[in-house]
Image (cartoon, rainbow, N blue to C red):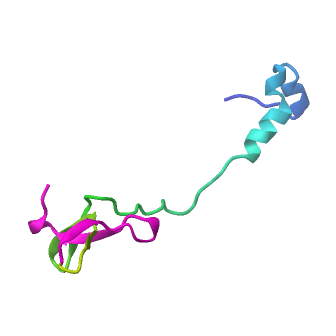
């Protein structure tokens, strides 16, 4: 076990200048303790989950014309839109 003298100035006098007492004081003040759980991750493209007992996969939402034909990906509001689709009808 290391003995630390009561007079801390005497302890720090032989240490080179970048490691002086002020440097250690700055490091000690920057310690962060987190007491809360980690942030829950958001679902990504291709993720799977069970909804109502049926497995679903997250896919891009598509835009449709007035006849119901797919014409592109839905990017309403400048953000990509996603939907949960049952995995039985999903194409890899």
Residue at (40% x, 71% y) in the render: 76
83 inside magenta stretch: yes
**For this view, does 8 lie left or right of residue 43?**
right
Q: Which residue is drawn at 79% across and 26% down?
A: 19
> Which residue sits at x=76%, y=46%?
29
On the image, which quarter does residue 46 sit in? bottom left
Residue 47, position in %: x, y? Answer: 26, 60
Quarter of the image where the C terminus is located: bottom left
Along the viewing direction, whichever of 66 and 45 lies nearer the viewer:
66
The reply, left or right, for residue 43 in relation to residue 22 is left
Can residue 49 be seen by looking at this rendering? Answer: no
Q: Outermost residue, left direction?
A: 88
Q: Residue furthest front?
A: 66
Q: Which segment is the magenta one? A: 68-92
In front: 73, or 83?
73
Can you see residue 22? yes
Question: What residue is shown at x 9% (from left), y 67% (from top)?
Answer: 88
Task: Give the quadrant of residue 48.
Answer: bottom left
Residue 78 figure quarter: bottom left
Expressed as whole percent of the image width and height from the top left, the position of residue 70 reads 20, 69
In the image, is 44 to the left or to the right of 1?
Answer: left
90 is within the stretch colored magenta:
yes
Quarter of the picture containing the N terminus is top right
Residue 16: percent from left, percent from top: 82, 19
Count of picture labels? 0
Q: Vertical placement of 67 versus 16: above or below?
A: below
Q: Say above or below: 67 vs 29.
A: below
Image x and y of residue 54, in percent: 14, 74
């Amino acid at each position: 076990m290391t003995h630390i003298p009561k007079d801390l100035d005497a302890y720090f006098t032989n240490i080179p200048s970048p490691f002086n007492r002020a440097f250690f004081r700055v490091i000690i003040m920057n310690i962060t303790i987190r007491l809360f759980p980690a942030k829950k991750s958001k679902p990504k493209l291709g993720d799977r989950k069970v909804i109502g007992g049926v497995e679903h996969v997250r896919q891009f939402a598509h835009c449709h014309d007035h006849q119901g034909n797919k014409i592109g990906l839905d990017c309403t509001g400048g953000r990509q839109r996603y939907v949960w689709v049952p995995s039985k009808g999903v194409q890899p």
